[in-house]
Amino acid sequence: MRVFYESKLAKRLLWQGYSTITLGCFVFTRKSREEMERQVLNHEAIHVRQWEECTAASAVLLTVIMIMTGFSVWAYLLCPLWFYLQYGMEYLFSRMYHLFRGVWGKNGNKVSYENSTFEMEAKSNEMIDGYLDVRTPFEFFRYYGKI
């Protein structure tokens, strides 16, 4: 994982109240190295591992599909995006769920964001140094159904 401190990209991409974003195996933050908390680095490292797992799993799935259908090898370029597709779908489903439960507006957005399996795993384990050393692959699956 490579961290870019005081990143111009983070300053342009992130909304008010957010300081750090993970894109693939890179972490971009508005904060300086001295300001960065260990907890935030752990959180983002968990996201990097999740991204790696989703990328590998989508490549395996795509290989099976290509063998059966003759899909183009160019489709492999989509594998690194699988994590973000899944993240976005979870957010939208959570958003709809909370809409029908009557939680909407600014609070509904925060609740929907926090109910992503990726966010639940990262938030639950960000305080544990060395969590990635003991984490089982695809650990985020344990958080499905816990809205």
Image (cartoon, helix red, strand yellow):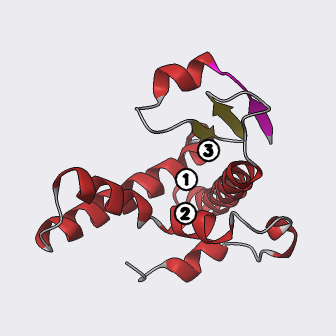
Position of residue 146 in the picture relative to residue 65 (left or right): left
Q: Which residue is mark 2?
A: 118
Say which element carries label 3: helix
Residue shown at the point (53%, 51%) measured from the top left: 82
Q: Residue 59, located in which quarter of the rendered image?
A: bottom right
Position of residue 17 in the picture relative to residue 97 (left or right): right
Q: Position of residue 126 (x, y in %)?
A: 69, 63
Three-letter residue code for mark 1: Phe
Say which element carries label 1: helix
Residue shown at the point (59%, 57%) measured from the top left: 62
Q: Nearer the viewer, residue 78 or 8?
A: 8
Which residues are the magenta region?
A: 2-7
Three-letter residue code for mark 3: Pro
Query: In the rendered structure, are the residues bearing label 1 and label 3 in contact, judged by CB atoms less than 8 Å apart?
Result: yes
Q: Which residue is mark 1?
A: 83
Q: Which residue is mark 3?
A: 80
Q: Position of residue 121 (x, y in %)?
A: 60, 69
Residue with the most extreme top position = 8
